[in-house]
Image: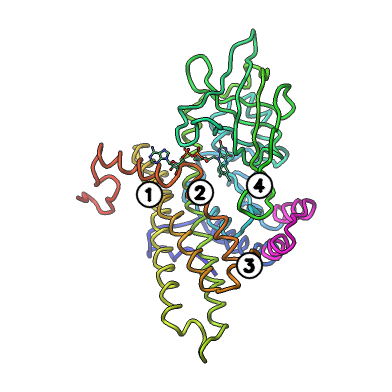
Amino acid sequence: MTGIEPPGTTGIELPDEIVEFRQQALEFIRKNVHPFEQRVAESGVLDRDEYESLRRHAEEEIPLPDGYGHTGEADGPEVSMVVHVAIEEIAGHVTNGLYVVPRARGRNVFGGIASEFQRQKYVVPTLRGEMRHAWAITEPGSAGSDVKAISATAVRDGEAWRLNGEKWFVTGGDRAAYFLVLVWAAGEQALFIVDRDAPGLEIVRRPQFMHDPHPSGHVELRLQDCPVPDENRVPAGEGGTRRWISVERLMIAARCCGAAERLIDETTQFVKERTSFGRTLIEHQGVEFPLADSVTELLAARLLTYHAAEACDSHPDPKIIHGKIAIAKLYASEMANRVADRCLQLYGGRGYMNENVANRYFRELRVDRIWEGTSEIQRSIIGRGLAKRGRVPYTALLPNDV
Ligand SMILES: Cc1cc2nc3c(=O)[nH]c(=O)nc-3n(C[C@H](O)[C@H](O)[C@H](O)COP(=O)(O)OP(=O)(O)OC[C@H]3O[C@@H](n4cnc5c(N)ncnc54)[C@H](O)[C@@H]3O)c2cc1C
């Protein structure tokens, strides 16, 4: 059983109800989601009805405790980032995007920048699970890592705006009721809420990706003279996007830690049971060492991730927080990929089967080094911070650290 160390060991404390939630969620996942996940992997088909019923079952069995953003009323800053990370880590125990653990924080980010009208019309129904949304930032042109390079535009047309552009990799776009689309509007970058059925909005393609069948596709969108009312322009625009990306990065780090936990647990079980040359695999040093490295790196990644989460909750300087999140995302995503590679190897030929858990993670975790800022971009953020502010704000752990 995975668990936060008792208070005092790391200094990280969690409310009792979140400790309990994590345990219950993990039990639910092992009992209900892992078998479903295995069926999807073996058949190559995701039964949509079964998935939706699993989600409903999860909402009933493992609701987030009151006050943690589940109701749509209590979302917001009172839920610490440490708590969000602790919840998200559990979601990492699942492959194929079958995150049935309720996740309130991603929604909070949009909730935090929306106008009151947008909050009532879009955010609250989203929080209640009645609507889904998708973020449309990346484009087929130069705008991926370089968000400033977007070419999509919004031009004033009386009381409304007309949007034009193409967006790629829109995760959840095939199920979204509305899109958050980043464009240039009147000389600055701005986010617009675009309804799924808006005239001129078209899903052009649903490409296939490395992972198994997934509840959400990553679609390509086209907007052609798409009319959007002014009230759908999100007030905080670019600032909101930046904050969303930062929080998403931290959540990726958390999920990577959860993924590595499961990989190590399942692979350890396997190598304790399988034998070669008259002994169990784990008794061979060549098998024991990669697992030992994996455990060591996992602990380092967890410490970095919780450290960055604590910085979000208490550090006064957003630039330092941004740097600490980059460190956590870089390390945790690369760690999880190394762990998946080692575990696949330890499964031998079984690891090459698509249905094998290490194989699935090996394919699936690859994206964590790419999306929400590639590893190279994280290194640039860390390097630029070092050049501007020196090492100490990023590595200080002790009072008056040097
Ligand atoms: C499965 C999946 C889901 C996604 N979901 C979404 C989504 O929901 N919404 C959305 O808007 N986007 C989404 N994305 C897009 C994702 O955020 C981008 O793919 C990512 O930011 C990288 O951009 P890019 O693909 O254009 O690569 P590029 O920016 O073209 O980079 C290509 C390579 O060049 C390197 N590189 C670029 N600039 C530098 C530099 N300055 N220094 C060093 N190296 C550099 C990169 O690290 C990378 O290795 C998704 C992508 C995937 C694969």
Expressed as whole percent of the image width and height from the top left, the position of residue 106 reads: 56, 41
For marks 4 and 1, the one nearer the N-term is 4
> Crowding at label 3, few (<14), some or many (≥20) Cα neighbours within 10 Å?
some
- Residue where numbered disc 2 is placed: 251
Identify whether 239 is placed above or below 128: above
Q: Secondary structure at mark 1?
A: helix
Q: Secondary structure at mark 2?
A: helix
For marks 3 and 2, the one nearer the N-term is 2
Whole-angstrom CA distance, mark 3 to mark 1, is 33 Å
- Residue where numbered disc 1 is placed: 327
Relative depth, front residue between 285 and 251: 285
For marks 4 and 2, the one nearer the N-term is 4
Residue located at (25% from left, 39% from top): 387
Q: Is residue 34 left or right of residue 20?
A: right
Main SS class of the magenta portion in the image: helix
Over which residues does the magenta segment extend?
A: 34-60
- Residue where numbered disc 4 is placed: 208
Whole-angstrom CA distance, mark 4 to mark 2, is 24 Å
Whole-angstrom CA distance, mark 4 to mark 1, is 30 Å
Q: Quadrant of residue 357?
A: bottom right
Which residue is the extreme one toward the top? 158
Say which mark, if any, is on residue 129: none
Relative depth, front residue between 401 and 145: 145
Whole-angstrom CA distance, mark 1 to mark 2, is 13 Å
The amino acid pointed to by label 4 is Gln
Q: Are marks 4 and 3 in contact (CB under 8 Å)?
A: no
The amino acid pointed to by label 1 is Ile
Q: Is residue 165 left or right of residue 129?
A: left
